[in-house]
Amino acid sequence: YKYYYHFVLFFFQNLVIISSFSVSPPLSSFPLLSLSLPNSNHRHYRSHQHRNTCSRTTISMGSSESKDNGSDTAAAAATAATASSPSTSSSSSWSVANPNDGKTAQQTFKVWPLDEYNTKLLNEVHPKTWSNSKKGKGKASDSDGDKDVLVYDLVAIGAGAGGLVSSRQAARRGAKSAMISSNLAGGDCLNVGCVPSKALIRSAKLIREVRKAQQQKSNTNDHDNNNDDEDFGVNIVGSVEIDFPQIMKRMRKLRADIAPIDGHERGEDIGVDVYQGFGRFVSEDTIEIVQKGKENEEEEPTQIKFKKAAICTGGRATLPPNIPGLDKAPYTTNETLFNLTKLPPRMLILGSGVVALEMAQTFATFGSKVTVLVRGNTLFPRSDPDAGPLIMKLLDKDPNVTFLTGASITNVETLENPVDYEELPLMKVSIDHHSTTSADGEKNAEKTNIECECLLVAAGRSPNVENLNLENANVAYNAKKGILVDDNARSTTNPNVYSVGDCTADVPRLTHMSGEMAKVVVQNSLFDDDWRLSSLVVPSCMYTEPEFASVGRVSASASTTDDNEVEMDVYMASFEHNDRSILDSDREGYVKVFCQKGTGTIVGCSIIGSRAGELINEVTLAMKHGIPLEGIGRNIHCYPTTGESLMGCGLQLINSKWKL
């Protein structure tokens, strides 16, 4: 996707519409040219080569920044809401040579080691001496007496996917916009989500390819084995050695290379007033920005007013309650996993969702002995019923991966907790789980104690809604689900406040959903439009090997929102007979397309395969624009490609209607 988006971004950014207004006109006078590009779970619409384009010219088009599960962690506001307060170190920039910087990065922002790459990252996404004064893009208020309060058309609280897209798109389209960044700009996506995880996944995939070639060569030396189609002709001498510190160093470098596109300077160049600090509501139209270290000082926090506000504070890993010893244990979440400098010999993962499975396979490939705790009997119980068992079977082929079903943790005991954060701790975890050792296959209860150096908690996400003083703004929310919104992404209780991304109740918690919601919010809040969340067709993809992608309803008897079962026809094509899959010696997986019974109307799709994330986009496009399955069947696909399996599903439907 990346290269496609870079091309599109380059093309549209060079169609610059320069407005010769000396004073910004009303928003209604701007023509609407909204560019609504597709999203992906990678960093999309970005290219650091285009960092300096589209500075202060008025561009009436859609956003070019959209990311992954971006979040500013509201729960960490008390410690991470660092703004322009003076640093304890003398340098105006983060420095490897300054020991105080390393301590601050680790304790306040959960970033370590502070090497040249993490230094570059922090200087982009949380500059040490960023000033919140002398902001000039908001309009001075005439109603606040002697107070110098700026009024913005749109203020975004949070600097993840939602905050970046909404504030920058608003600025490009002529609005006076501001963004408040409490932790690290780029949110989860850049810092602790899609970007670092995909870098590790790429390294792991390369390792598996090398091992696969090595194993196949070994197998063909057995004359009783006729595996000529499995022998790629690659002769690897010796063992495959894994350099985990180098793998992590590569990840940090690539993350730092991407960081400038999310940086504060980039936002200011586009036309956004970027504030560094924690934003919280004072009233229904006013936000104050609290700077770390000045909470108890007499100096008043910076205050700004808004006509419209977008809450984009994201989410965080959920810490399951009522597990004795867990809260005091040195557990790991996605916020700290990518700081590892030593490979944990044993990893225990609490959870069996996307993050859990991606990292289980990745770290098992690196050499960790990984145990995955599955709460139920299978993976993804609410999804395609064939998907969970097949994915578990395929991942379980790795001898370093073990699944425990019906599992629950009863106790966590910390055995070692080193002071040096780069050293690995040691924990003993007590687990109740199912056992299938009985002759009749009945699942019996069993108790197990497992010692591990890494306990990864990946058991869901919680919205960051704490400490925002939402009551002051009359914004209704549910602490477990998030901010309550209508179909326009608008607060159900304050029509001037909107919500974007993981902090929002009842929306998919995906990066590309955050990016698309931000476009919806800008369009509805500033241009009085009626874009609806219910109109969005949102695919998802898990980047294991094979990948698992889905969109829409993916079970033969799925319940709709009004609790009525929808009957479906299912069309399935296995990669076992796909020529490209045969040539790649990669035949595992399938394509399933779900249609409204008796019609070609597509209501969902489920794909397991090495290119599932690419294939799902064709179905998503068809669903969005009402193209029936017959249309995919009649569409010419390149040969040989795995996409022909989708065409095959369409041909099944077409052939079923043939008559003599």
Image (spheres, helix red, strand yellow):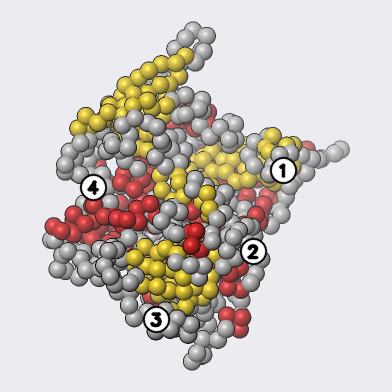
- Residue closest to the eye, 614 or 64: 64
CA gap, disc 3 and disc 1: 51 Å
Numbered circle sitting on residue 562: 1
Nearer the camera: disc 3 or disc 2:
3
Pointer 2 residue:
531
Q: Amino acid at mark 1?
A: Asp
The kind of residue on which mark 4 rests is: Gln
Residues at marks 3 and 4 touching, judged by CB atoms closer than 8 Å? no
Q: Nearer the viewer, mark 1 or mark 4?
A: 1
- Up-down relation of residue 354 to residue 433 (above or below): below
Q: Work out how far the residue at label 2 is from the one at label 1, CA to CA, in angstroms.
A: 22 Å
Q: Please identify the quadrant where the C terminus is shown.
A: top right
SS assignment at label 1: loop
The answer to which of marks 3 and 1 sits earlier in the sequence is 3
Q: Say what amino acid the circle numbered 2 marks.
A: Trp
Q: Please tell me which residue is depicted at 27% across the width and 28% down the height of the picture.
A: 413
Amino acid residing under circle 3? Lys
Is the residue 384 above or below the residue 132 in the image? above
Relative depth, front residue between 156 and 216? 156
Q: Secondary structure at mark 3?
A: loop
653 horizontally vs 413: left or right: right
Mark 3–mark 2 distance (CA, rounded to whole Å): 37 Å
Could you tell which of marks 2 and 1 lies nearer the N-terminus? 2
Q: Which mark is residue 147?
A: 3
**Extreme residue toward the top, this view:** 439
In this image, 2 relative to 264: left or right? right
Q: Residues within 10 Å of mark 3 (few under 14, many from 20)?
A: few
- Which mark sits nearer the N-terminus, 3 or 2? 3
The crowding category of the residue bearing disc 2, from other C-alpha atoms within 10 Å (few below 14, some 14 to 19, many at least 20), is: some
Q: Position of residue 259 (x, y in %)?
A: 34, 62
Q: Which residue is mark 4?
A: 246
Q: Nearer the viewer, mark 3 or mark 4?
A: 3
